[in-house]
Amino acid sequence: MFLLQTPWSIDSLEAVDAALQQAIRTRVNGGPTLALLPHSDGSEHDACSEKDVVSALAGLAKARAVYIGASAYVRVDGEAVPRTVGLIIGPDGDVMARTAKVMPDFIEGYTDTAADTFQPASFQIARTPLGQIGILCGEDILAPHVVRTMLVHGAEIILNPARERSDALFDSRTVARVARAYENVVYVAVASPNTATIDGASVTLPQATALYPPQGKAISVRGAESYLSADIDIEALRRRRVAPVLNFASIVRMNLYAPGYKNEASAPTSSPQSRDEWLTDGQARVAAKARAPQSDDVTTYSAMIGQHVVHQSHTPEQLVERRQPNLDDAFDLVRNYGARAANLKLVVYPEFFLTGPVSPLGFKLGHIADKIGVTFPGPEMDQVAAFAQEIGAYVSGGVFEYDPEWPSRFFNTAFIYDPSGNLIHRYRKIHCGDTMGFLPDTTPGSVFDQYVDKYGYEHLFPVADTPIGRLATTICFDNNFPETYRAMAQRGAEVILHPTSEPHGAHRMGWDAARRMRAFENVAYVLSAGHGGEYFLPGRTSPSSRGRGYSKFINFDGSVQAEADTAGQVPLGGVIDLRALRQARADLQANVALWDDSVVYADEYGKTPRGLPNNLWPDDPLGNPYFGGAEIKKVAAAYVEAGIFVAPQAAE
């Protein structure tokens, strides 16, 4: 694959053709070749007819016997204003895929090209010897639901012709491509020009051309070179897609979110309208979800992540015995810091900070659910409530929960207590390691119908309205699924607390990119509180691989405000500025979510197959239907049958 930085227009193809010829000369191996061009030179005022653009690119593809991907401003018959269209053209000159841009041109400024109406987009896939290829133009790669929709149409490689600019959000947009590749198990190929001539003015642009693999470091340009040569191992991607471990493309429970998206898509404000009207409506929705100013509101305050080292339990008896020392250590960590912290209003502890992970105890644990989980109220959580009163702050964390209404089951639950000791928020983890078979907790999707009948659909995504902002929680594995965070933000969440316990490993870069994106995509602070390790047990000489620390305090623009760059006990402080967040939410360039419309993707989320189905564990709480990743393998097989995935070649 060749990714070109050379600017082009249909009236000036000489330079890009020369660069392409030089790139082709460097090939050692023969076979099909894909060349991705950046977004075309010029502005919307220079838009040509789509027919002329196709003709010019088809001529280039045929002359060099390559597949061409590119985007351009075009004039479409019957439409009053130009739009951006992405095209994939085969070596024979035929158009293999066409995708019109969904998002507006907010990187370059809002223009008349965004005046078309919202409607379900066409996500076409070019099925080539190089792989199944889709194309998303410019900012569309920043929209997680749009990328997910391209995935379930069959994309293995997503081309992203763009025209990047240097601004405060450039780094976050770069990280977005890392996250999209990782959470969808796709290659993301970006081509952005090194210069552009717009309305007669020539400008030099930042280096943004790169290939982002599903896992690992990007291959990026190093300067103003004309092109980047990047190899794709499509068979490695296909093998990973049918494997059960960390296969987010198969694990995501798309059907769980579908009812919410259907309701949004059918709401009067989501009917097709101009983007000017949509922006006005979006800003009105942001204002409506914001907390009405009250006398006790605090808009700037200190928050703390208590990166805790847990006394790990390896027997059912220890699960109960070690809760108290874990509580005492967690409280002391904050007490020692809190005495010196100014205006401390919020504290977050890691996932299962009272017990550590219980997966070492086995993969069928329903018979000891009451020992694994704490209750609300209960002896341990009553102490947390008293601690919140003691320090005068909101206190959050993640625990295993036993609810007598669900006999022989336990949930992975995040909580928030207010400074008066009241339980104001309880969230049960939607995406969890249970799907890979080694942590047999119950998630709402596993018992979806029973759960929604008992509590209602909105109970899945709780948000607490408080004087220090609208607070929500997610847990560990949720980090890799943007749908959950978007659901919280759609309900007004401004500060999303993320108790987590993450392992070391090759996927760390992807998890960290996803963490930053959850903040950027939703204009929300994300406080990710990780385990700092575990106390060694008798006869044990090494810690668990699942307590790597590196807790992070992420700003609402996706930048990292603070990081615990170590394992161990760490009190990590940061500052929440809700005034700045709320100002950014009203800014069409800063708030990608303003342009989210479920009309584009709602139908796709409700189809079958679409990730793990709901209701896979409605009975037999003493069992474990997910053992060995069995259900993920079934989804992958269904995706292969539907043409969404391609089966890897059989091993020799």
Image (spheres, rainbow, N blue to C red):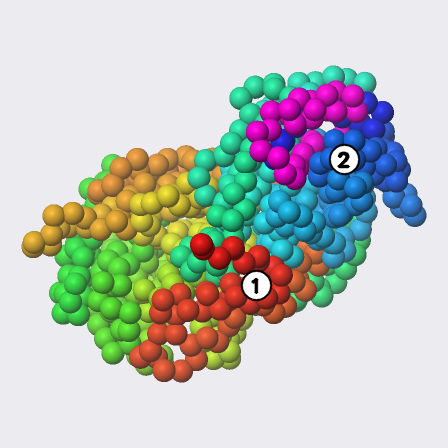
The reply to whether the C-beta atoms of the residues labelled 2 and 1 are less than 8 Å apart is: no
Q: Could you say where residue 502 lies in the image, as x and y percent from the top left? A: 33, 50
**Reading the chain from its start, which is encountered first: label 2 or label 1?**
2
Q: Please report the bounds of the magenta region as a residue range.
A: 13-41
Mark 2 secondary-structure assignment:
helix
Q: Could you say where residue 633 lies in the image, as x and y percent from the top left? A: 46, 65
- Choose between 363 and 562: the one closer to the eye: 363
Indicate the amino acid at tag 1. Tyr
Would you name the residue on which mark 1 appears?
A: 639
Find residue 443 and report its image quarter: bottom left
Quadrant including the C terminus:
bottom left
Farthest residue to the left: give it: 538
Of badges 2 and 1, nearer the viewer stands 2
Q: Could you say where residue 293 lies in the image, as x and y percent from the top left? A: 54, 49
Q: Is residue 466 magenta?
A: no
Instruction: Tell me, for residue 61, which label it has, or none.
Output: 2
Identify the residue shown where x is 49% and y is 68%. Answer: 634
Farthest residue to the right: give it: 78
Give the distance between the C-alpha atoms of the residues marked 2 and 1, in whole angstroms: 31 Å
Q: Does the magenta stretch include residue 22?
A: yes
Q: Crowdedness of circle 2 by 10 Å Cα count: few (<14), some, many (20+)?
A: many
Find residue 422 and report its image quarter: bottom left
